[in-house]
Image: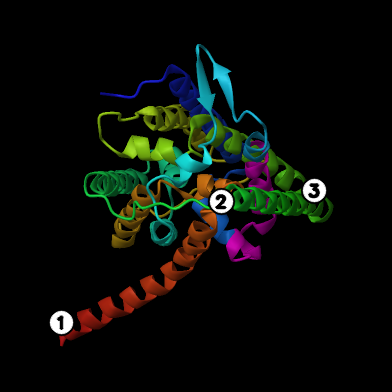
Amino acid sequence: MVHWDGAEIGGAVIGGSLIAFSAMINLFFLGRVTGMSGIFYSLFKLDKQNGLIWKTAFVAGLFSIPYIASRTDNTGVELGDGYLPFYDSREMFAEDLEYPGYAIAGLLVGLGTKMGNGCTSGHGVCGLARFSKRSFVAVGTFMATAFIMANFRYYVPFLTDAKVASNDFQDGYEIFGDVMFGLVQLAGAVAVVYSAVNAEIGRGKIEALVSYFIGSIFGAGLLTSGMLRRSKIAGFLTFNDDWDPTLAFVLGAAVTWNSAATHFILQADKNAFGEPLMIPKKKEIDPYLVAGSAIFGLGWGLGALCPGPAFIDFLTYYQLLIWGPCCVMGMMLADPIKSVCNRLCVKVGNDVKA
């Protein structure tokens, strides 16, 4: 049997369309691909050479609309004849995953997205839209391993004895989330002002402001589509009597709209300011792409969380205090692991020649 909810399907299509619109604006005006894992990795590294200012503004915008929705009394809307929830309840979010599961899932997602150069946004929404062979391989790989992990956990349960903190603790955590949101918005405002004052005339002066706007649309898309709900992700990845196909409509809408726009933008080969597009140039299918995508899929299937939605949920659900740092750790470990693997491959190659 298939779980078919008209309101949630409608939300998925609307949300996927908003995500596509955000990606279109980013590519058309700023010439950039919208990859969540890459954006967050640069922020965690405080990488001033790779767009720290505009990425700060983007993330501030990304958090804005979902945060406001999370703090309202009724976190959802009437849509057609049904109701579209934006967030899981505290109990539903915590369901079926122990604290160590969040740690393992976060580590795998961070390691996999960095090693494989992307996640559901960079490879899925943007890569498929420009018919990138690397992205087709990446998406096929991480979807396969995510389905495998989610279904294995469903039929052979492990790490499912979930504990839930007291309501008082969770209320306190939401106050912590409020403070974090305020700090992120302050950083975003500083980024917008800094960009306007210090950048050269042209795109640079509005880059951070446009990035904030792009991020806010992307965040609205994640909110509306159901991507901020662990239950929705798990329901899609798990084949059972109540399988939920909603997220297929999210990706379908996002890729359809974005591919149409991307076709025309790529033909122009320049952004709205006449500058070259910053499209990933790597085309070969290398082992790290496949391995990283597989690792990401395992983490996604285990935790039902990927970078963009998870870091938004950090403001609301205390479990992300475990997942988040482990995800960052995984990202930071990716390059050292690749370096060790490269040295081993060279050594083995030399031994074979000898």
Q: Quadrant of the N terminus?
A: top left
- Whether residue 263 is in magenta: the answer is no
Q: Secondary structure at mark 1?
A: helix
- Alpha carbon of mark 3 to alpha carbon of mark 1: how far? 57 Å
Q: Secondary structure at mark 2?
A: loop
The residue at 25%/33% (across/down) is: 240
Q: Residue 127 in the image: state x and y as whole percent.
A: 42, 42
Q: Residue 32 in the image: state x and y as whole percent.
A: 56, 45
Left or right, 64 with reference to 243:
right
Establish if 152 lies above or below 47. Answer: above
Q: Which residue range is magenta in the image?
A: 43-65
- Residue placed under numbered mark 1 in the picture: 352
- Residue placed under numbered mark 3 in the picture: 201
Looking at marks 3 and 2 on the same chain, the residue that comes earlier in the sequence is marked by: 2
Q: Residue 14 in the image: state x and y as whole percent.
A: 52, 24
Q: Residue 142 in the image: state x and y as whole percent.
A: 32, 48
The residue at 72%/47% (across/down) is: 208
Is most of the magenta stretch helix, strand or loop? Answer: helix
- Residue placed under numbered mark 2 in the picture: 166
Q: Amino acid at mark 1?
A: Val
Q: Quadrant of the C terminus?
A: bottom left
Callout 3 crowding tier (Cα within 10 Å): few <14, some 14–19, many ≥20: few
Q: Amino acid at mark 3?
A: Ile
The residue at 78%/49% (across/down) is: 189
Q: Secondary structure at mark 3?
A: loop
Q: Amino acid at mark 2?
A: Ser
